[in-house]
Amino acid sequence: MREVVHEFEKFTDLKDMLNKSVEKFENRPAYIFKTNEQGKFSEITYKDFKNDIDRLGTALINLGLKDKRIAIIGENRYEWAVSYLSVTNGAGIVVPLDKSLPNNEIENLIIRSEVEAILYASKYDEIMEELKNKKNTNLKYFISMDLNESTNGVISLKKLIEKGKEQLENGDRKFLDAKINPEEMGIMLFTSGTTSQSKAVMLSQKNIVSNLMDIAATIRVDETDRFLSFLPLHHTFECTVGFLYAISKGSSIAFCEGLRHIADNIKEFEITVMISVPVLYETMGRKVLKAIENKGQLKKVNMGMKISNALLKIGVDVREKIFKEVHQSLGPKLRLMVAGGAALDPETEKLFNSLGIKMYQGYGLTETSPVIAAEDDEFTKIGSIGKAFPSLDVKIKDKNEEGIGELLVKGPTLMLGYYQNEEATKETIDEEGWLHTGDLAKIDKEGFIFITGRKKYVIVLKNGKNIYPEEIEMLINKIAGVSESFVYGKIQDDGDYKISAKIVYDKDIIKDVYGITEETEIKDKLWKEIKSINKTMPTYKYIKDIIITDEELIKTTTRKVKRHEEMKKMQ
């Protein structure tokens, strides 16, 4: 186990966590919103946030939903956060649903999870009306986040909160006094994938607060920080790290208005902390370098990074002063960016750290609540996912000659299991309590973990050599004009694999960098770059075939490539 870097508050459950935060930060802003007046913001304090949670929770219990399953679906918004903590802090079991699912999959998951109520945004009015008429689910209550008045069998969330306020004023303490069992299932989360493939992960509140305490022990965040909520809240990475962790530390949260607005939102809201996926940071990094290059300052900035990195070794930090202009363009208060969900390009991590904006890579799974390991203020190593969290044990199973094998983890953040799927649970968590991540990794002598790829995506050649697609993709993605790539093995007549790559290019960048627009010219240019990459690798890893396209790869809502879907297209 790693050392604890920071002192941290201990929590027994999410209700305990919220109560402690409100006690310390009741008059500080929990949420920040734009107003119609430019540069002016409205705030919801921790005290007001808790009042809304208590009111809604009380009203939900009075609807007969105590200990029932309650779903939430909608974009990232204040009502989503209130709904989540109202359910977990005394009402029942929360079931966050993916906001990007098609109607048939939403219906399927509502049936599978056996929820009795759903809180939803107006975008889902049509499917909710269908379900109300079909009567093929356990749903008794449809609660709209957007209606001002209850109508046609749909309850207004606003009115429900008002009702809860009345009930509290009349001395109703059913929600306030509700006891939480932190060992039982409190959260049901569906893994990404189609309804036939997705599994329902059962998490307890002990799982979640154990992760919150581990994060607090390793990454410093406090009440002066402001988070930008960008990734979908139904996903456990954003929910645990970007929402619950921020609340546990008294930080404030602002909602991103969309991908196109992210750069402006960072500056407007004076964001200090961001939680996101690598592709966003890599895009930001490319834009930063391009802007520096356009101003003719690339040589000067590179020299500044060399000097400042040398000074850091003797404890002198001049990065903020030297790169003030870069900080202003990104966001003058942005200090910390945490990447998770996929492998982060080491060059991107080096760039931001050299410019004076801390960038840490983390790693986790829905099944582990979610974070297993992360870099932090003391333990960082470029290219690694840091060390395992203080409460967790990790080990490598079936190491090969390079020390690579499957990463296993054990500790208090491990899920209770998959709902109604004992077979899958036993496949994932062995008899000794080790969870098999399905990811291949190696651990160095200092305890830093390096992920090399997914176990099921490894290409095993006839000569016994293993090829990890993600490693080669990272090299391809560094080619100017390449947005993303997908490396796979194409089966040959002799039963062996031809290493192939599907490359997604950006038309504008290709034209800007190489001055070409025709697809044949683009393919020739990219082939030339691929041949240069081949020279840096052993011959058995050589890419021998490429497909090029300007259409992005199929992805989950958290921007992970759906490799099995891409493979189907190749066949």
Image: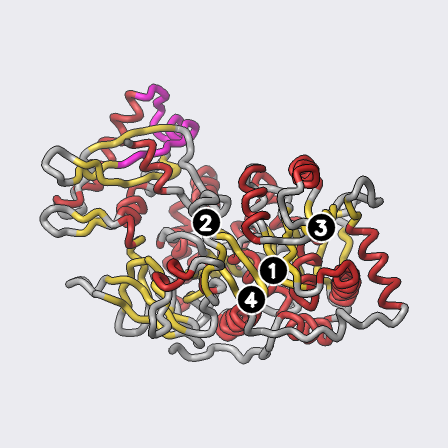
Mark nearer the viewer, 3 or 2:
3
N-terminal of the two: label 3 or label 1?
Answer: 3
In-front residue for pair 505/91: 91
Residue 226, horizontal then vertical, whole percent: 63, 60
Q: Which mark is residue 198?
A: 2
Q: Which residue is mark 1?
A: 243
In-front residue for pair 166/466: 166
Report helix, strand or loop for mark 1. Answer: helix
- How far, Cα to Cα, is label 4 from label 2? 18 Å
N-terminal of the two: label 1 or label 4?
Answer: 4
Q: Is residue 516 magenta?
A: yes
Mark 3 touches mark 4? (CB < 8 Å)? no
- How far, Cα to Cα, is label 3 from label 2? 25 Å
Q: Quadrant of the C terminus?
A: top left
Q: Quadrant of the N terminus?
A: bottom left
Report helix, strand or loop for mark 4. Answer: strand
Q: Which mark is residue 140?
A: 3
Residue stretch in magenta: 501-519
- How far, Cα to Cα, is label 3 from label 4? 21 Å
Q: Amino acid at mark 1?
A: Phe
In-front residue for pair 43/285: 43
N-terminal of the two: label 4 or label 2?
Answer: 4
